[in-house]
Image (cartoon, rainbow, N blue to C red):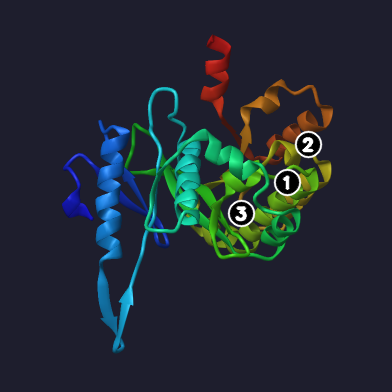
């Protein structure tokens, strides 16, 4: 793949079979062409293993980063949605993100029963991405967890895109609970020995639920993880809510020692200046 890129392009493995590619100073059509060449090369690659011929395939999703679209979580979500559209269109396809793709996904392409099944039973993948201070880029400040879920058909779906299609508060609470349980069961103890913070998403609906927040704090008390190492990512819009439950729960988390990270700050700032 590197042989097809410019010296200024940046290619990195995100986890599993996922790769990310940053193309500075590149328009959409050029990005589509570059991605198409890489996809064709991957699809044409054959190899022998244990006497059998194997083929691999790939799809790609593209989104543009500019001054109005520069939040890492949103950019990753858009690229995932575009990639998901590519897979739905037959694989081996390059798709550029368009807002209607997200609206189509939100419109309910996944049934209520399948949503419940994905949350309760299907595989959940957690990918840790290092977040570093611009002053010390070599040092990791904390780990930001990105999440992937699988549909019943075996398609991978980015957590934010999946969450956007959940209309029932019970589903949103169930997804928050599954993420917390998965993290504390499998990852909290190993992270404790490293002493590095970790950031987990918590929905606005989850933050408003006293039951869910109490469960979170109980899991934290039963874990060796220091509360100061747990960062919870919440939408900045919660600060404007006149909801007493949300404010009380936010105070409980802070008093317990948890750190709060506000997301979508740039979006709110843009709204306030237009």
Pick whichever of labels 2 and 3 is earlier in the sequence.
2
Q: How many labels does the image show?
A: 3
* Residue 124 point in image, percent of width and height: 59, 60
Q: Answer yes or no: do the residues labelled 1 and 3 have beta carbons within 8 Å? A: no
Residue tagged by mark 2? 208
Q: Where is residue 130 in the image (x, y as percent from the top left)?
A: 42, 47
Q: Name the residue under label 3.
A: 225
Q: Where is residue 101 in the image (x, y as percent from the top left)?
A: 53, 40
Identify the residue shown where x is 81% and y is 26%. 243
Indicate the secondary structure of the residue bearing disc 3. Answer: loop
Residue 231 in view here: no
Q: Residue 273 carries which label?
A: none
Q: Please report contact status of discs 2 and 3: CB closer than 8 Å, yes or no.
A: no
**Along the horizontal axis of the image, is 182 left or right of 46?**
right
Asked if residue 3 shows in the view, the reply is: yes
Q: 60 or 193, which lies in front?
A: 60
Query: Of circles 1 and 2, which is in front?
Result: 1
**Screen quadrant of the C terminus:** top right
In what element is the residue under mark 2?
Answer: loop
Reading the image, the residue beneath label 1 is 172
- Residue drawn where x is 48% and y is 47% of the image: 80
């Amino acid at each position: 793949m590197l042989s097809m890129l410019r010296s200024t392009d940046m290619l990195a493995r995100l986890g599993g079979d996922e790769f990310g590619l940053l193309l500075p100073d590149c328009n959409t059509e050029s990005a589509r062409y570059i991605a198409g060449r890489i996809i064709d090369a991957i699809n044409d690659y054959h190899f022998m293993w244990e006497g059998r011929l194997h083929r691999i395939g790939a799809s790609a999703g593209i989104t543009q980063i500019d001054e109005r679209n520069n939040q890492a979580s949103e950019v990753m979500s858009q690229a995932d949605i575009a990639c998901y559209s590519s897979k739905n269109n037959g694989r081996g396809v390059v798709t550029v993100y368009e807002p209607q793709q997200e609206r189509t996904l939100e419109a309910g392409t996944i049934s209520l029963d399948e949503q419940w099944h994905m949350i309760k039973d299907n595989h959940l993948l957690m990918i840790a991405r290092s977040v570093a201070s611009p002053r010390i880029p070599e040092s990791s400040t904390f780990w930001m967890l990105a999440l992937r879920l699988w549909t019943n058909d075996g398609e991978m779906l980015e957590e934010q895109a999946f969450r956007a299609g959940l209309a029932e508060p019970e589903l949103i609470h169930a997804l928050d609970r599954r993420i917390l349980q998965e993290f504390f069961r499998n990852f909290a103890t190993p992270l404790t020995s490293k002493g590095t913070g970790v950031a987990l998403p918590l929905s606005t609906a989850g933050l408003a639920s006293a039951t869910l927040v109490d469960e979170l704090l109980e899991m934290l008390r039963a874990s060796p993880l220091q509360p100061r190492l747990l960062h919870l990512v919440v939408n900045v819009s919660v600060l404007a809510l006149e909801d007493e439950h949300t404010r009380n729960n936010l105070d409980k988390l802070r008093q317990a020692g948890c750190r709060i990270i506000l997301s979508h700050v740039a979006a709110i700032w843009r709204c306030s200046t237009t």
